[in-house]
Amino acid sequence: MFKPTATFRNETAGLDLFEEIKRLKEEKNAIILAHYYQDSDIQDIADYIGDSLGLSQQAASTNADMIVFAGVHFMAETAKILSPSKKVVIPDLRAGCSLADSCPPDQFKAFCDQHPDHTVISYINCTAAIKAITDIVCTSSNAVQIVQSLPADEKIIFAPDKNLGRYVMQKTGREMVLWDGACMVHEIFSREKIIKLKERYPSALVIAHPECETPVLELANFIGSTTALLKFSKNNPATTFIVATESGILYQMVKDSPEKTFIPAPPENNCACNDCPHMKLNTLEKIYLCMKNEEPSIDVEEAIRIPAERSIRRMLDISAKLGL
Ligand code: 13P
Ligand code: SF4
């Protein structure tokens, strides 16, 4: 039985949280959506675990009355934008995202106004207000294809992740105007330490998320979203992988391929910086409490939700046409 920590001891003392969450799921016709960066016990209780694209597709199509979003704020907000009539709850309202924070809406609006003839593509890791002034949203699963779906001479602003933007420019051969944002977790990996690890494990493959900086991506044998990294590690015959993304994904990698070795790519210093501090705010106790209390819940005002939904649906439509 899961043992509650001090924070919520009074409300959850003596409860079997796995059983209680299962009971609330039925009682409230709820679905638990979890990102791969969540702790293993949350991944185990989830109805669906996935990357940002998969999670938004699930949020758009579910018949549940309540969506419990075990992820960060922009993900729960995306679910609410796509399913406004449903109750969307998040275990901890403080679970933000350094990348989304790196793009304040007023500054971004001014930036877009400086490039009026540009189509705006925004990575899903941004606020609803940014999505509302975006033409097409993308995720790390489909960013390359979304850019390629536009005519070759179309001028593009890409925001907020400059690392993903640079990667997409390199893959497509297209110039884009990049917003100067980044993820605190994916910028922490050390190229020098990865090179040393490669010397120690010469047959290991480096697999990396495109939010990593170019010097790290240059070392990668494979680059992709969390779902793509998971599939690659499962299907590739190699037995050792150095994994340059948030550490939560290793749980599913080991589950899928218990005979293989997964080494988290080392950060610059000796911290646990490849744990996303925002994702890791969520706990089983908080999941139980947000289901029971039906809060914190997410609301998005219609003036923002409607244009934000348009830019997300454009992404979902292009992805569906391409079979992504
Ligand atoms: P994906 O879910 O697209 O792999 O992106 C990872 C991420 O940083 C989510 O915050
Ligand atoms: Fe944001 Fe980075 Fe955490 Fe993903 S890993 S939620 S991009 S801070």
Image (cartoon, rainbow, N blue to C red):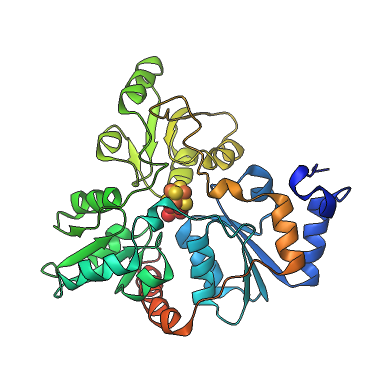
Q: Is residue 256 left or right of residue 133?
A: right
Q: Is residue 99 left or right of residue 173?
A: right
Work out whether 165 lies above or below 321.
Answer: above
Rendered location of residue 217, percent (x, y): 29, 38
For this rendering, which residue is in front, 324 or 13? 13
Q: Is residue 128 left or right of residue 215?
A: right
In the displayed image of the protein, which residue is found farthest to the right? 14
Looking at the image, which residue is at 73% across and 65% down?
Answer: 291
Quarter placement of the N terminus = top right
For the question of whether residue 238 can be seen, the reply is: no
For this rendering, which residue is in front, 82 or 276? 276
Labels in figure, total: 0
- Which picture quadrant has residue 172? bottom left
Looking at the image, which residue is at 40% across and 73% down?
Answer: 312
For this rendering, which residue is in front, 168 or 193? 193
For the question of whether residue 62 can be seen, the reply is: yes
- Which picture quadrant has residue 104? bottom left
For this rendering, which residue is in front, 282 or 312? 282
Looking at the image, which residue is at 27% across and 66% down?
Answer: 108
Work out whether 223 lies above or below 314.
Answer: above
Rendered location of residue 2, percent (x, y): 79, 43
